[in-house]
Image: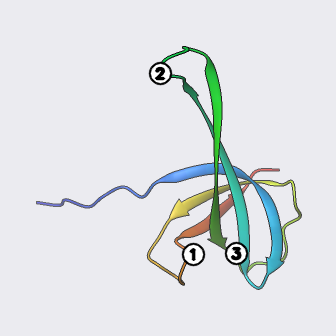
Amino acid sequence: MNLQKRKKIKEGIVVSNKMNKTLTVNVARTISHPRYKRVVTRAKKYYAHYDKGILQVGQRVRIQETRPLSKLKRWLVIDVLT
């Protein structure tokens, strides 16, 4: 029986490229507020590994969950969208 887990994939915007082979990606999601029933945007930053050149701040990327690469880095850039 093959019980292989699917790796999570998220889309976000590069907010920092100052580290060596690492990007900071801001992933925003919209949820419905439990009490007020309004649509609210929540955001979280992820550290993602990228060693194929330099991406500019503001570019949209797709990241995938991977094994721990460092203390905080657990994501890998798999596609550049814009």
- At x 47%, y 21%, the residue is 34
Disc 1 versus disc 3: nearer the observer: 1
Res 30 → quadrant: top right
Residue 50 badge: 3
- At x 36%, y 55%, the residue is 6
Residue 51 drawn at (x, y percent)? 72, 81
Q: Are marks 1 and 2 in contact (CB under 8 Å)?
A: no
Disc 1 versus disc 2: nearer the observer: 2
- Disc 3 crowd, CA 10 A, few/some/many (<14, 14-19, 20+): some
Residue 48 drawn at (x, y percent)? 64, 69
- Disc 2 crowd, CA 10 A, few/some/many (<14, 14-19, 20+): few
Q: CA distance from mark 2 to mark 3?
A: 37 Å
Q: Nearer the viewer, residue 81 or 66?
A: 66
Residue 34 badge: 2
Q: Are marks 1 and 3 in contact (CB under 8 Å)?
A: no
**Residue pushed farthest front?**
35
Q: Nearer the viewer, residue 56 or 28?
A: 28
- At x 89%, y 64%, the residue is 56
The residue labelled by disc 1 is 73
Quadrant for the N terminus in the image: bottom left
Q: Amino acid at mark 1?
A: Lys
Q: Amino acid at mark 2?
A: Pro
Which sits earlier in the primary sequence, circle 1 or circle 3?
3
Horizontally, residue 77 falls left or right of residue 37, namely: right
